[in-house]
Amino acid sequence: MLELKVNGRIHSVDVEPEMPLLWVLRDHLNLHGAKYGCGISLCGACTVHVDGVAVRSCSLPVASVAHKEIVTIEGLSQHGLHRIQQAWIENQVPQCGYCQTGMIMTAAALLAKNPQPTDADIDATMTNLCRCGTYARVRQAIHSAAGAPATRANAAKS
Amino acid sequence: MAFILSRRQFLKASAAVGGGLALEFSFPLSSADAEGATGTTEVNAWVVIHTDERVVVRIARSEMGQGSYTALAQLVAEELECDWSKVSAEFASPNEHIRRNRIWGSMSTGGSNGVRSSQDYVRKAGAGARAMLVQAAAARWDVPVRECTVARGVISHRPTLRTLRYGQVAAAAAQLAPPAQVKLRDASDWTIAGKPVQRLDIPDKVRGKPVFGVDVALPGMLHASIAQCPVFGGKLKSVDAHAAEKMRGVKKVLREDGYVAVVADSWWRANEALKKLDIEWDPGANGSASNESIAAMLREGLADPGLPQARKQGDVGAALASAATVIEAEYHSPYLNHATLEPQTCTAWFRPDGFLEVWTSTQNAEASMAAAAKAAGLPLEQVEVHKMMLGGGFGRRGAPQDFVTQGVTIAKAMRGTPVKMMWSREEDMQHGYYRPASLVRMKAGLSAQGKLVALHARIACPSILAVLQPGRNTSGVDFTAVRTLSDMPYTVPHQQIDYAMRNGHVPVGFWRAPGQQNGFYRECFIDELAAAAGKDPVEFRLGMLNEGDKNRLVLEAATRAAGWGTPLASDVHRGVALVNGFGSYAAIVAEVSVSAKGELKVHRIVLAIDSGYVVNPDTCRAQAESNVVYGLGSILYQENNVKDGRIVESNFHDFRLPQISEMPKVETVLVPTGGFWGGHGEPGILPLTAAVCNAIFAATGKRIRSLPLTHHDLRKV
Ligand code: FES
Ligand code: FES
């Protein structure tokens, strides 16, 4: 049995230590927000936060994240929508949406570390792949979220 | 209805199967209870109204990011004159569709048809429901219909200052006969359609709600991963499953004709066990096919003296013989995978009562129904396909329903237990229905004045229709392989387009804007001709377009917006191209630079498009951006090579997608001229490749006649 802390809740899971976190989340904890796109750290669709850092969960053995703070898109905001999610709606970013939870998690970690990212920062960090081509709006939404401080009023809007 | 459990009954049954586990079960964005709980009225097949004024619009087409889910709801709501803030959408049930005599029209979602081919009947449905609601109100008040007005879902009788809301009369309206005729609103009066309203599917998508095919979770559900014979057309010879069967969570190893599936209690376990199988394949007749053998096949096609003609006008032979200048060039494109970010997936459950339920990401729910019924050996009436949101489609999930056949076949072997099958990325990359590789030779004659007088093209290209609709095409010409060359808008007196159908063994399919390679060939070749004639590429094209031709209009709109002819930064160069298709007209001006090291940067794309009408301008802009990135990947890096009968590439390291840093600035110029309905999902990609390659020529003096660019050295000569 392995103890995992996901979105503030402790879960005991009976899985192989080498099972990637992505599959523990999806198939054992029923959290489907993180997606499978490549399985080998190339696309970022599986991005979640581990101790506040955006990581690609398809390539992370679950044993390596026991007792760490894991946050998925489902737990990104305790109250309504995170300002990144709001910016995503305001800028109508998603198309098919499949890559978008990974994009949002990567962007949220970026903004937490770097509240006013430049275009170059965005280029360097947002290496998630989007087959639908939402990149222009991803950039725009990150800038607009960076401009909007995370106020309670914002959170209440949702 | 006899075989259908209600959604609530199903939830109850599922909870029982799940042994009390709190497992999530979600239907795609359904807010209406289709079973007619109190307070819900189906006014007609498209419009469901709740007593609390919520309006649910049923959507028959699929949603893969292109935005039809919202645009179609806008069109219905426009005619219904309801309150848009109360509108949500849900997918129409394919099973009900069959039982109600295909009441929702086509469910197929491709060819940029989602809106343009259903706009007429969905608008009539909205207008019809409105008429019935007004009639019901008038009857209740006992006043003439013509004295009633409607605004935002409220019916008013001004003379007596009375009002009724749609929710109050919906039940009575549903009893009335639909009107024989309705008058549709003029686009100039639109208040919901034509506006950039927020998409209805986006809130769930940013929350990470389980809306996709791969997100289906059913009580007791098992997972499957499959390995298909890597050589197309090959078969399974033998498999040693000893080690795999002993692995944790593995329930079954299934041997089928062309693939092996492992069923386990999680996808990862199934896939790990799959890797441990010792499989021997019989490659069949195609085990030695390669890039070289395919190139030879296409080249042989070009040399065939007896080719059928897709177009013949005038006498190209004579015109070429007497032309002042003759230019000849050969262009080529590789096979390309769709690479939807969500791999192919299908969940199926043979219920204890004999009914089959399927959940899948499909571009054509009716085709999914047919494939599922066939694989199950059940009549259509005993099958339901739950339409999930697609993690990308681009043509992969429409005509071919291989994933549904497999998903149902696997679940059949696990009768009573739901099984979710998902392909690994590697399977997805190597088992597509690829954009055809093609080889084209073009020969053109210019007059002494530099006018294009004759064009002769020979196209060797596998036929998509021969693969996907065998037997339908008898003329020997597949229009998807010749379009853009066979239907040029340019006034060229002598034209001949020959088609060599050379199919090979690689399955081909509708890849976003099927036939768009011909846009690359034609518009780059036109650029070559303009250069040979010493003319500006825009002027050269305008000189061959009739007044009033909408191709002319978009070319002028794009060049005006891009500032064609105005100075640019010294290292930036422009290219232009123009192609119509999928009901719309599109022109692009591309701005690129090429560094001394030969690195290409695409700075700006100005895309002008005339689709007749625009239902959601923001979605149309998003589709323009989407077409640019999708096309850019194919220009820069993407190719699927064939070796030993199989596809070489396996994942995103050798089939790269552009990243955010490579995204050019995209400016979309919407110039809807009305009077026709064109699409937006594909037209934007049509002129892209040629515009970029023509700009590369302007920057480097190099003609790009094959792709991707990884095979070219762009350093200046
Ligand atoms: S699935 Fe993890 S990076 Fe692609
Ligand atoms: S929105 Fe479809 S893959 Fe990014």
Image (cartoon, rainbow, N blue to C red):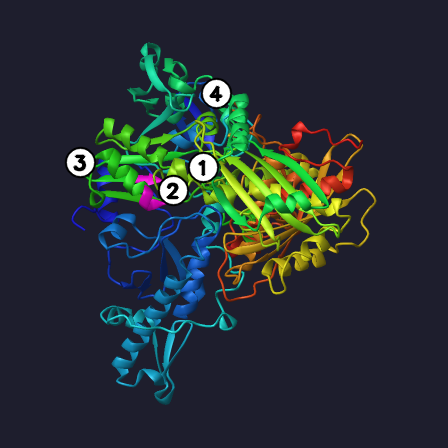
Q: Which of B240 and B464 is in front in this view?
A: B464
The chain containing the residue under callout 1 comes to B
Q: Give the label on residue B289, or none.
A: 4
**Mark 2, residue position:** B473
Query: SS of the residue at dot 3?
Result: loop
**Mark 1, residue position:** B463
Residue A52 shown in magenta: no
Q: Nearer the viewer, residue B411 or B103?
A: B103
Query: SS of the residue at dot 1?
Result: loop
Magenta segment boundaries in residue numbering: B358-367
**Marks 1 and 4, the one that precedes in the sequence:** 4
Estimate how packed mark 4 is, as few (under 14), some (14 to 19) or many (20 or more) residues with alpha carbons within 10 Å: some
Label 1 and label 2: CA atoms lie apart by 10 Å
Q: What residue type is labelled 3?
A: Pro
**Mark 3, residue position:** B352
Vertical relation: B620 (above or below) B222: below
Whether ligand 1 has any atom under 8 Å from the Cβ at mark 3 is answered as no
The chain containing the residue under callout 2 comes to B
Label 3 and label 4: CA atoms lie apart by 46 Å
Estimate how packed mark 2 is, as few (under 14), some (14 to 19) or many (20 or more) residues with alpha carbons within 10 Å: few
The chain containing the residue under callout 3 comes to B
Q: Where is residue B423 in the image (x, y as percent from the top left)?
A: 41, 29
